[in-house]
Image (cartoon, rainbow, N blue to C red):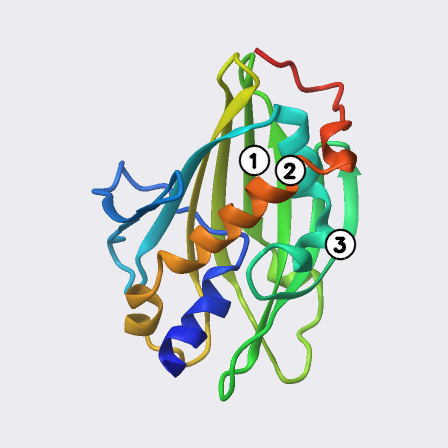
Amino acid sequence: MAAKRIFFFLVTLISGYYAFAEPEWVLKKDKDGIRVYTAAVPGSDFRMVKAEMTIKANLSQVAALLSDVSRHPQWVYNIKEASILKRMGPMEFVYYSEVSAPWPASNRDFVVNFKMSQPSLGILVIDSHCEPGMLPEMAKKVRVTFSISHWVITSQGDGAVKIDYSIQFDPAGSVPAWVINTFISDGPYKTFKNLRERVSMPEYSRAHFDFLKEK
């Protein structure tokens, strides 16, 4: 049980996708309209994970929710603290986040570059990666130095969007890879459930980004 709890806090790190050839995804969870897959990564003991679902929302709603960093602790699983450190424009910023760890593990923290783009009509892409050197390491916290994530939000043209999220990371420290890999599907599933519930809140449903064009 302790091992499962340790994984739950680590898997919520909102970053991590590694650019290999298309991996062999294995379906691990299919529940409540949410599918979670895992895949082996060459050269790494940690498996990568992806989650997907379709929800009633538009691109601006999802962009507004994901970029509302200070509220991540309210819905991203086990996030204790989150704040924006630097803005480079409406589509890119750097943020800090701390993940609560169950005893006896130490909390993890990370500094992430978050960048939105629209490669084509009706598609929002978000890429994130760690920039650990932008902030000094803090006492009693383990700094995550490697994580890359990739979001693709695709308008379905009927008031719905499909969300695809992929993540790979190394949690650093001494947590065994088997702990992470055993329970890797649970954290993304819980976070996606919360995302689906919160995206319809008024502050997100009224959101509009000029650079996003719906399908």
Callout 1, which amino acid?
A: Ile
Residue 17 position in % (x across, y down): 42, 46
On-image quarter of the N terminus: bottom left
**Nearer-N-terminus badge (2/1):** 1
Query: In the picture, residue 56 is in which quadrant?
Result: top right
**Relative to 74, residue 150 above or below:** above
Measured in 3D between alpha carbons, the distance from the residue under mark 2 to the one under mark 3, in whole angstroms, is: 15 Å
Callout 3 secondary element: helix
Label at residue 70: 3
Callout 1 secondary element: strand
Residue 141 position in % (x across, y down): 61, 79
Q: Nearer the viewer, residue 131 or 110?
A: 110
Residue neighbourhood size for the residue with mark 1, other residues' Cα within 10 Å, grouped as few (<14), some (14–19), many (≥20): some
Residue under numbered circle 1: 126
Query: In the picture, residue 6 is in which quadrant?
Result: bottom left
On-image quarter of the C terminus: top right
Q: Residue at x 48, y 46 (%)?
A: 149
Relative to 96, is 206 on the left or the right? right
Residue 140 position in % (x across, y down): 63, 84
Residue 129 position in % (x across, y down): 55, 49
Label at residue 199: 2
Residue neighbourhood size for the residue with mark 2, other residues' Cα within 10 Å, grouped as few (<14), some (14–19), many (≥20): many
Measured in 3D between alpha carbons, the distance from the residue under mark 1 to the one under mark 3, in whole angstroms, is: 18 Å
Callout 3, which amino acid?
A: Ser
